[in-house]
Image (cartoon, helix red, strand yellow):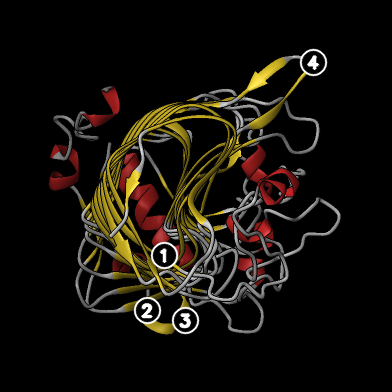
Amino acid sequence: MQGSQTPSDPRPGAGHAAAAHLCDPFEFGARGDGTTLDTSALQSAIDSCAAAGGGTVLLANATFLSGTITLRSHITLRIEAGATLLGSRNDAHYPALYPPTVNTQLTQCRRALVYAESADDVSIEGGGTIDGNADFDQWRGMSRPEGERPMAIFTALSRHVRIEGISVRNAATWAVVNLEVEHLVIRGIAVESPLGPTHDGIDVVDGHDVLIENCTVNTGDDAICLKSGSARGLHDVTVRHCTIVGAGVANGLKLGTATVGPVHDIVFEHISISNAQAAAIAVESVDGSAVSNLSFRHITLTDVGTPFFMLLGARGNAPIGSIRGVVFDHIRGGAMRYPWGSMLSGAPADASGRHDLQDVRFSDIDIAFKGAGPMTGRYVFGSGRDDIERFPDYAGGYPDPKFVFATPASKAEVTDYQLPGWAFFVRHARGVVFENCRVAVDGRDTRAAIATKEAVVVGLCMQP
């Protein structure tokens, strides 16, 4: 698949201007004492470099307190080890941003500490830190809408973007966000923002030719999340050699929730995932997106709600899209938090036709699922046919494992349930294949390992 190829270097032949022209914020009046607001000095250094045709703005040996700074084309923001760009806690220092595009995710993406719009050849690098300095009471969790809190990094409508080697801490909302960016590399960064719901780690919203590698992520919400909020869609993305040490209340690797345009040719490989309350791997299409040609391979997972979650449906007035051509290969895991099992669900047939998941393959899987024991949860399903028939279809609520019973009105979060199968519940699906698949149950469970409804499944999972 195309997505398995290494994206092109985002700065082919670039860097010469940056190397030739160095801009020091201290020469523009920066204090670097961590208490004096240095926004104006930092922006002046950026603009001076841009006026000279490009260059490097160097932050070294100091802490620079700042509101929004805007990078220009051919600019490298280099934050040296020991230096910190520290976000102000004053709302007035983060003006609303309006990238000239129509994208559903702009409601959440309105403010940022570091921003680039319609820029070409932009880099953020070095061994230093961008600290969002999120106020524990003002900007933590869901205390205010995402659009009113600043992201640590936000690049939009840009080309040849590189984010490398830095640490990103304490973002007030989503940490590192790239919207409709072409030729993007995120390499060797560490995101540490475990501040509860709405604090994603790395988000890519639409665009193409993306490489995310050698990153470590610890967040309160989704760790690495791919989305589409426009008809433009997202394709040719590789995420590899990453370690997710926390995804808080959400998912380790997620495709969704926003799924408007086509999403295809995506590879996730050589990734470890732990400490995620929902799913280790979530694949969703609920806004009409045609999702295809996805590969998840060589992934280990532990201490998660469930290993897999796949959902095709519609919320609001969106059409039902499609999910087809998904491969899970060489997946290892255990120590599940809940006895949910993993749900793979298409949508029921309607007047427009069938809406099945199609061509989903599990190969070389070795996972221990949590047993339900006496099954005393609020929603209890055994192994009988009646249980399978009455398990509800997706009703348009928030599409995550904890919300499978929710409606848009209820917004219910439920963790005390068990699916009809202790390993997999496959519904409204065709061409689901299990080969060389090994599953075990940790504890006791009377359910079948795999339960199906209106699904064509080939193969079985071996049990000890």
Q: Do the residues labelled 1 and 2 touch (CB within 8 Å)?
A: yes
What's the CA distance linking mark 2 and mark 3? 7 Å
Residue ranking furthest to the right:
409
Q: Nearer the viewer, mark 2 or mark 4?
A: 4
- Report x, y in % for residue 370: 44, 69
Q: What residue type is labelled 4?
A: Ala
Picture coordinates of residue 167, whole percent (x, y)? 30, 68
From this view, report whether residue 428 is shown above or below residue 126.
above
Residue type for callout 2: Arg
SS class of the residue under badge 1?
Answer: helix
Mark 2 sits on what residue? 31
Mark closer to the observer (4, 1) = 4
Q: Is mark 4 on a helix, strand or loop?
A: loop
Residue 244 visible from this viewpoint:
no
- Looking at the rendered image, the quarter that the N terminus falls into is top left
Task: Pick whichever of labels 1 and 2 is earlier in the sequence.
Answer: 2
Residue behind mark 1:
41
| Label 1 Cα neighbours within 10 Å, binned few <14 / some 14-19 / many ≥20 | many
Q: Which of marks 4 and 1 is nearer the N terminus?
A: 1
Determine contact: label 4, label 3, CB under 8 Å.
Answer: no
Q: Residue at x 64, y 65 (%)?
A: 417
Residue ID at (65%, 27%): 288
Amino acid type at circle 1 is Ala
Question: Which label is found at residue 36?
Answer: 3
Residue at the spot of label 4? 351
Q: Nearer the viewer, residue 440 or 259?
A: 440
Type of amino acid under label 3: Thr
Q: Distance between the residues labelled 1 and 2?
A: 9 Å
